[in-house]
Each structure stands twice: as structure tokens, then as C-alpha cells.
Image (cartoon, rainbow, N blue to C red):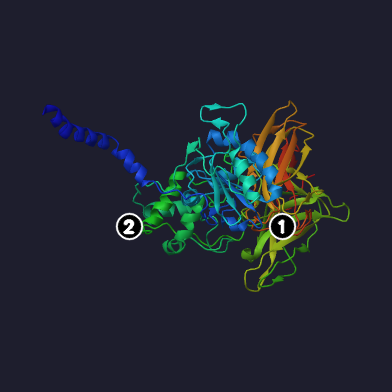
Amino acid sequence: MFLSYLRSSLIPLLLLLCFAGNREEILAIESQPVKPQPGTSAGPLRFKDIRYLTRSLQDFKNQKAFVVIACNTTCPLVKRYLPRLKELEQQYRPQGVQFIALHTGPSDSIREIAEFAIVHEIPFPNVQDFHSQSVKTLGLVRTPEVAVLDSDFKLHYRGRIDDQYRIGGALPQPTENNLADAIKAVLKNEPVQITETNVDGCTITSHSVSRTAKSVTYHKDIQPLIKKHCLDCHRPQTEAPFALTTLEEVQNNGAMIAEVVQDQRMPPWYGGSSHAEFANHRNMSRQERRMIADWYQAGMPAGEEPAHLTPVPAAQEKWLIGEPDLKISMLETHTLPADGYIPYRYTVLPYIFPEDTWISAIQIRPDNPGVLHHCNMAAVSLAKKWDESNFITGKVPGSGPTVLPKELGILIPKGSALALQIHYTSTGKPEQCKISVGFKYVEGKVQKRYRFLIIRNTKFTIPPGAPHHEVRNSKTLDRDAHGIGLFAHMHLRGKDLSFLAHYPDGKDESLLIIPNYSFDWQIGYLWKDQRHLFPAGTRIEAIAHYDNSAFNPFNPDPTASVRNGPQTYHEMMYAFFFYTYADERLNLTIDPKTGQAVK
């Protein structure tokens, strides 16, 4: 009887206790999304490229297979497998296989992803999986898990790259080459023998992790951020597409503001995260970005209006450098078509400098800012043959006036006139534009002349379809120098550019990485206090990469070989290094009325 009682009463109780102990685990398993099975369609997927554009696998033309690698910038196993992945990509790219690094880290910004690709020399596209949509569609759970798809986006393999590296250990050589075997089978239109394998690596964190949003209002929280980060550009009579001077203007653009701030597309800054020592570094903190996201998700509440509102900024002053000592305007007004590509225009300003003139500030000012993409200015003279030293300054997207520190000066030689190279853009309606240039003379003394190296390469040829073509060059400093800043110029195929210093003692230093170069935002990078001393013999090197593939959304013609040239359908590789001689003491007294040295 007693044994019968145990069987009838205790055993069910024990089973109930066992079930209760595993209940959370069982519920967790039940709550996991069902993975798509090999053989099913994964669709074209969606992600953002390094240019902040939403893309899909359909943007890769005429590919026979796709290899999607789940990545982030921190997983050690991702980094260990990158050399293997690069070998496989080099082997199979000519056979029509497109490799894609799909970054899954919720905190990895697009700029950080692009920088990761440069540091690790990844030649294939690195993209961001926003909202974890693509990893869910593919059923990827760890980095560096891979998925192999055919040209119709059907999933054929999901799993490890091979069996060599694991968390905490490694084999001398792989015994199974799962990824390579899957690629070969898809290319031959044969069944993949092993369609899924277990994966060691870092668990993928979903972008959709919930958190409690803070109470945020416009007047208390958002207006100060807009004033701090946005109003330099987003006000009337500037190049910005809309103003953000009022609550209504900010609300009208709330969704776009939230998106570009989350992407870290705005405020505009294209320098790598490891180089934050520049005086003009634009950055919005993670806390500030979250505040804007919270405000938008809460419905953009105004909050209590303060008793004393901050005055709306006036329209931008015509001359940001102050009233110029010398103003020169084009004689003609350029008439521009409503649409289409506008070739470069050239003009010479109607003024010849009678003597050597020392300048402390220059502003190139169009009367119609919305149509000017960029403008370069150079000194021209019948007495001197044109070379790169004739360059004076330029106006490019994202740049302000050229303003020098005290006792520095730009020298415009006697007998020079100023020539402008102008790139206009169409706006959808006929436009006109006239450009003026304002100059401020040096006040007091000039001790150092503002100098620059132009590191350029004009002898390159970028092959058709090349996704990561490298062009480089370097120049050597002949005297000890203090660095002022850096600037890069490429055209529509420009992908990234890095500056390196190779010192005479054998040491190397990375000065700047521009990981996702933008033709529309050509920013100068200015050191805070010229504290960078570069001894004589330092070689400054610039290394650029170009994307001439069909995946580049701005590529004029991916089937063409591309060479150096002035138009945007050509390419350029220009890297500027601005500096002064460390030991220079000119001790020139400047006449404030003429900008000329007092004799």
C-alpha cells in the first residue's frame, strides 16, 4: 500500500517539480523565433551602407551567390576569421560571389563600421543591419555565423566558416571547410551536403532591446540641443535644406532628425572615432542622441514654454569673418539650368594684387548658397607657371571660412589675380549665382607663413567594377613643422582616405582616417593648437580607396575605367597637409590698410 501510495502521489509531484525547475528554459525555447530552413527564400534583405543609404541584395548586379557574414566590431572570433574570409572573397569574387559583412552590434555606428573595415583591410562591403531585420530573416544567432544564398536569395547554408577556431581554442588546421564547400555547391547548382552547422562565437544582441524612455520636452531638452549642434547651418540663408529655428520647424522634420541623429549622420563628421583631437570635431553624445529619439517616440511634446524664450537666431551674417578689408566680386552672374549635370565653371576675379599681401581670413560667399557645391580659389600670374603651390583656399560642403590664428598669414604674391573653379548643382528650377570673396588682412605682425603639402596621385587607373581600388602617394617635409590640419578631396567613387606620418626614427602614426568619405561633406580637420611637431624628414602618406562597383550608388558608370580628371565622372586623389615651419620667425609688421609689409 505504501509503495503504491508513493507511486501514485510522489512521482507526479516529482515530475511537477522537475517541470517547474525547467519551466523558464522551456518557455524561453518556445519564445524563440522559428529559424528559416535551408531551401527557403530569404528575400533581398535590407540594410544600410556606409553612405547611410538603405540597400538590399538587389543592389548587387549579376551575382551568382551571396555570402552574408554576421559581424560586429568587438567579437574576437570575427577578427580571427577575417583573413580567411578575405582569402575566400578574393578566390570567389571573380566567379560571381558577393561577400557582405552584416554588422549586428546595436551600438556600432555606420562610421565605426566603416572604420573597422579600413583598420582590418576588408575589401568587401560592410553594412549595418538596422532593427536586426536581416539576421532574423536569415536565422543568424552568433557572430561570425555565415549564410550562403543563391542568385534568387534562396538560403542554402547557415553555420560556421570552418571548424578551426572556437571560443577558447583552435585546431592547427581546419578539418572541415563548410563555407567553401557550400559556395562550390551553389556555383555548380548542386545540393549542399551539410546545410547547417553549429557555430561558436558571440551571441547577437537584438537592436530591439526595450528600455524605459525618459520624459523629454522641446523647450526643456531639445531646443538646447538644436541650438548647440544644428543652428550653425539650419537657419535662413545657409546651404542647409531647411531651418530649425522654431518648434514647428523641428516638429515638421522630427522623423528625419531622429533618423539622421541615430545614424550619426548629423551633426556631420566623417573622421574616425580614434581621432577626436580636432578642434572642429562635431559630436553628439549617446545620451543626447537617445534624448532626441525619446522625444520623437513620445510624440514630440512641446512642454512648458519658458517665460523668456531664447531669441530666434537671425539670418546668417553675410560675412562670417566680419566686414572684409577687401571685397572682390565676379563681374558676371552665372545662369544655371533647372536640372542635369553642370560642368565646372571658371572665372578670374577683377583685381590684381599690387604687392605681396598677407591675409588672415578668407570667405568665399555665393549670393545663392543652395546652388554652390564647392569652389576652389588659386592665385594666377603671367610671371609664374601654374603649379599646386598656387592654391589659396576653397569652399566645400561642411566648411566655413578660412581663419588663421594670430601671427599666421597667407601670402598672395605681387602681380597675382585670383581664379575660381566653381562646381554648381541643379535644384529643379532655373537659378542664378554670383560669388564674392572677402579678405581680412593680418593685424600686427606675421611670424609664420601658412603652408601646405598637396599629396596627389594623377597616374592611377581604376578598373571597371573594382570595389576597393587603392591609390596612394606621399611627400616628405624638408624642415621641422607644426601641423595645422588635414583635408581630403576625391570624387564620387571615393570611399575612404587615411593620413599616416612616417617619422625619421622609424615610428609610424595614424593621423586621421576618413572611413566613409562623402563628396557632399568635404570637411577640413583642424588640430587644436598646432601641438603636432613633425621633424624634418617626416614622410606624410595618404592612402585612398575607390569603389567603382555597381553597389556604389553614386557611380556614374561602373563599366568604365576611371582616371584622373577635373569633372566628377573622373576621379581625383588630393590630400592636403597644412603646416608652418617650426623655427620660422618672419617678424613682418603689416599695414592694416593694405595687408602689405611695412618697409
Q: Which of 561 and 473 is in front in this view?
A: 561
Q: Relative to residue 346, is residue 402 drawn left or right?
A: left
Please tell me the numbered disc located at residue 304.
2
Where disc 2 sits, the SS reads loop
Where residue 227 appears, as percent x and y from the top left, is 47, 53
Q: Residues within 10 Å of mark 2 (few under 14, many from 20)?
A: few
Q: Name the residue under label 1.
A: 558
Q: In this view, does 581 lie above or below 36?
A: above
**Quarter occupied by residue 569:** bottom right
**Amino acid type for the residue under numbered disc 1:** Pro
Residue 138 % position (x, y)? 50, 49
CA distance separating discs 2 and 1: 54 Å
Q: Going from the N terminus, do you reach mark 2 or mark 1 first?
A: 2
Q: Neighbour class for label 1 at 10 Å: few (<14), some, many (≥20)?
A: many
Q: Between residue 69 and residue 511, name the one nearer to us.
A: 69
Q: Mark 2 or 1, which is nearer the eye?
A: 1
Q: In this view, does 55 lie above or below 274?
A: below
Towards the viewer: 12 or 349: 12
Q: Which residue is drawn at 32% across and 43% down?
A: 27
